[in-house]
Image (cartoon, rainbow, N blue to C red):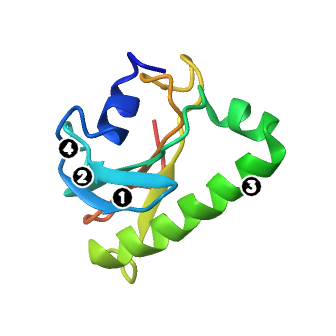
Amino acid sequence: MSDCIFCKIVRHEIPAKLVYEDDKVICFHDISPAAPVHVLIVPKVHYKDILALNEDKDMGRDLMAAVLNAVDRVAKDQNVDEAGFRLINNCGEDGGQSIDHVHFHLIGGIKLEEKLI
């Protein structure tokens, strides 16, 4: 999708503070971090949300495997792999999704509360 901000970051048309990138995902620091570590993990192929990703079974599985690989690498790189972190996916407007491109928030670097709201 040409006007999607995450697609523009994937194409390196918009700068981002990159943490990790491979052929399937791009990971960068959130511009409004909720914690000392707040990295977005974004599949390079545009899917509106995690449900749309799930509809494409084969590609969805491949992209989720790439996301999990990126989670492991980013957590280690950001030194939150041992202390712990939270991985969040917001889906839909009521779920808090503000950009219609499936993505995951890796949040850590502080002790997080159990409750989300």
Residue 70, position as x, y percentages in the image: 47, 65
Residue identifier under label 3: 61
Please report whichever mark, 4 or 1, sits nearer to the chain's N-terminal start: 4
Q: Tell me the kind of residue under disc 1.
A: Leu
Residue identifier under label 1: 112
- Mark 2–mark 3 Cα distance, whole angstroms, equals 29 Å
Label 1 Cα neighbours within 10 Å, binned few <14 / some 14-19 / many ≥20: few
Residue 31, position as x, y percentages in the image: 19, 38
- Mark 4–mark 1 Cα distance, whole angstroms, equals 25 Å
Label 2 with label 1: CB-CB less than 8 Å? yes
Disc 2 on helix, strand or loop? loop
Disc 3 on helix, strand or loop? helix
Give residue 88's mark.
none
Please report whichever mark, 3 or 4, sits nearer to the chain's N-terminal start: 4
Label 4 Cα neighbours within 10 Å, binned few <14 / some 14-19 / many ≥20: some
Residue 102, position as x, y percentages in the image: 54, 35
Label 3 Cα neighbours within 10 Å, binned few <14 / some 14-19 / many ≥20: few
- Mark 3–mark 1 Cα distance, whole angstroms, equals 29 Å
Q: Tell me the kind of residue under disc 3.
A: Arg
Relative side of 116 to 38, left or right: right
Residue identifier under label 4: 16
Q: Is residue 79 above or below residue 67?
A: below
Q: Tell me the kind of residue under disc 4.
A: Ala
Which mark lies nearer to you, 2 or 3?
A: 3
Residue identifier under label 2: 35
Q: Identify the residue at image location x=82%, y=45%.
A: 57
Label 2 with label 3: CB-CB less than 8 Å? no
